[in-house]
Amino acid sequence: MNKVLLFYFLLSIVLSQTLYPQNNKSSINKKQIKEQTDSVTVLISLADSLYNIKSYKEAISIYDKVIRIAPENTKAQFQLGYLYNNGRDYQKSFYWFEKAAEQGVAAAQYNLGIIYADGYGVLKDNKEAITWYKKAANQGYAKAQYDLGVLYSKGELVLKDYKEAITWYE
C-alpha cells in the first residue's frame, strides 16, 4: 500500500503543474485543453489501477479529482456509482449512476433499473425500473435484455407476457 500512496503522491505533484497552471490568463488555450484531457486520461488509468488492486478509497479520490476537472466524464461517474454501490452508500451510488445514465451510459441505465427494482437508496418503483432496463436494453446491453426477458416471463415488476419475454431474449 505504501507504494501506491507514494505513486499517487508523485503523480499528484506532476499533474498539479498540468491541471492547475500558474497562469493568470482568463482564457484556456488549445495546449492547456489537451494537457487537461491527457491528465484526465492518466487519472482514469490510475484510478482503474487502484480499483484493480482493491484500493477503493484511493480510487474514489482519483475519480473525484477527474470529476472536478471534467464534470461530464461518464467513466468517472459510472465508476463512482459502482464503487459507492459496493460500499453500500446507495444514495451516492444512485446520484452517480443517474448522472452517467442520463448521458446514455447503458451500464449505468441498467444499474438504475436494479436500484429502482430493489429500492436501494430510493423508493422502490417498478415502472422506473422497467424504464431504465429498457433504455439499457435498447442500446444492446445484454444483461438488461436478459433481465427483461426473465421479468416478463415470470411476471416480476410487470405483467407476465411471454411474447414480450421472447422479444427480449432474442
Image (tube, rainbow, N blue to C red):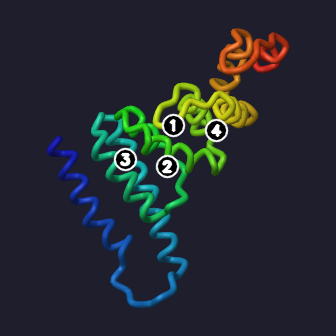
Toward the viewer: 23 or 147? 147
Q: Marks 1 and 3, Cα distance to the nearest angstrom?
A: 28 Å
The three-letter amino acid code for the residue at tag 1 is Val
The x, y position of residue 24, in whole percent, is 39, 90
Front position among marks 3 and 2:
2
Q: Marks 1 and 2, Cα distance to the nearest angstrom?
A: 18 Å
Residue at 28% across, 62% down? 12
Decide: few, some or many residues near mark 2? Use Cα within 10 Å; few <14, some 14-19, many ≥20: many
Front position among marks 1 and 3:
1
Counting residues from the start of the chain, the first of labels 3 and 4 encountered is 3
**Which residue position is annotated with label 1?**
122
The x, y position of residue 31, in whole percent, is 50, 77
Residue at 47% across, 76% down? 32
The x, y position of residue 138, in whole percent, is 75, 34
State the quadrant of the N terminus. top left
The three-letter amino acid code for the residue at tag 2 is Gln
Q: Marks 2 and 4, Cα distance to the nearest angstrom?
A: 13 Å
The three-letter amino acid code for the residue at tag 4 is Ala
**Which residue position is annotated with label 3?**
47
Counting residues from the start of the chain, the first of labels 3 and 2 encountered is 3
**Which residue position is annotated with label 2?**
77
Res 57 label? none
Res 106 label? 4
The x, y position of residue 139, in whole percent, is 73, 36
